Amino acid sequence: MSHFKYLYETRHRLIKLGLPALVSRGTLAIWGVLTIFIIRSLPPEAYAIYAVAKSLEMFGVLLGGGFIQQAILKLASEGDGLREKQLANSGILMALCFSLLSAILLIAGGGIIGSFYKPLDLSGIPLLLAGVVVTGTLNGLPRLLLLTRHRTRDVMITDIVQFIMKSGIIGALLLTGALKTAHQIFTAMIIANVVSFFVCAWIARHLFFPKAGVRIDRIRSVMSFSFIFLGAAMANFIYTRTDILMLGKIAPDDVAPYGASRSLSGLTLMVISAANMILLPYISRIWSQGRRKEILSRVWSTILLAEILILPFVILYVLFPRQVIDFVYSGKYSGNWNILLVLGALAVVRPLGSFFATTASAIGKPQYALYSVIVSAVVNVGLNIYLIPRYGGFGAAIATTAAVILGAAWVVLATTRHIRSNA
């Protein structure tokens, strides 16, 4: 009951910070709905190209400075002094360098990527992905600075601008029947990133401190955290994207049905993402202030709130998966309703692993998140190798579920033990 009491007592602050964050992440959920119409509009081959390219994009964004952004958010949230400003500057510099490197590698490796997925025509995709990586990194940096000060309302504004641009272009193409290829989607993403960057940079202009400079020891501090985040994110990429990548190679006919079900079940992730926007900088600050006895209570209260918000979705996916699939996709993937059932039920477990992994990073133990996703990745890859050839997309869903549950259990236990021993 104490967690319910905390939620009630802090309801005004939760609304002030949480509602903009939820709206901000809600744009991703609405984009997920738009993705459903994209699936219905695109030919199966074109959607398979989009699904595989989307996985490659996530990988490129990660290596292109995405792993450094987590370190910036954690370290720059610890205070308001010169140290934090120098850490932010150092992180920004390194993120820009890695984004350019990732873009170059994507373009140079276009031939290799195309030959690996030879049944799919990926010509032109690597160049567009490079553009997404660079513009996405640029757009994300001022957004991070806003989050370090919990300015979720301003972040909401920039995310809405990005969403309006991206969905507006795609929506126009859908309405006119001109949406035919994955290339058009990634082009829209680049345009949206550029526009959103200029808006976000203007709003966050007072949070840039170039005069604070960049120091080698600050770069070392940022990179020491960043490489742990990279390891965790790489392993996380493996166990969240192996299914699509392996389906594309082993069972390409199941890529579209699996992607369709994952898009639906992914609507619940907006709640988790919104909470993490606030949780990481908040826990980082109160940990550095010595208020460590408060942390577990705050984390469990956040989990409770997230479970309450996602419960209606879980009930819908678990009790009526066939009806949901029939309604949303006009009967197109009715035979694959069991994938939605499994992935929908998994939504109950996701807040535990995600929030405790975020907490581990905030208290200076990002390696706990790394170990957790390594456990998940090993389980997921092993089960995918065994299950996908036999059961296709349903096997991939089972593998993902087992991986997430085991990884969540490990990070909850490890993080709780560390907090209690250092409180």
Image: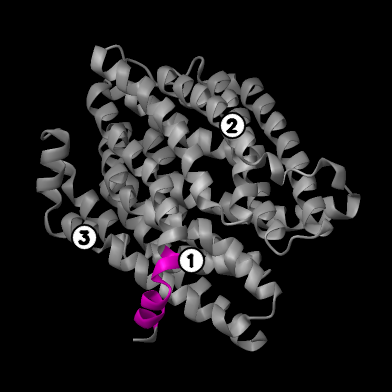
Query: Nearer the N terminus, badge 2 or badge 1?
Result: 2
| Magenta-colored span | 3-14
Find residue 312 and name its label: 3
- Amino acid type, mark 1: Phe
Which of the numbered marks, if any, corresponds to residue 355?
Answer: 1
Q: Residue at x 55, y 60 (%)?
A: 374
Quarter assignment of residue 175: top left
Residue linked to disc 2? 197
- Which is more foreground, mark 3 or mark 2? 2
Q: From mark 3 to mark 2, how far is it between C-alphas?
A: 35 Å
Q: Tell me the amino acid under the disc marked 3.
A: Pro
Name the image quarter holding the C terminus. Answer: bottom right
Q: Secondary structure at mark 2?
A: helix
Q: Position of residue 79 (x, y in %)?
A: 73, 63
Q: Is residue 133 left or right of residue 245?
A: right
Q: Along the polypeptide, which appears first: circle 1 or circle 3?
A: 3
Q: CA distance from mark 2 to mark 1?
A: 28 Å
Quarter of the image that includes the N terminus = bottom left
SS state under label 1: helix
Expressed as whole percent of the image width and height from the top left, the position of residue 210 reads 82, 41
Q: Which residue is found at the position 71% from the left and 29% from the top?
A: 100
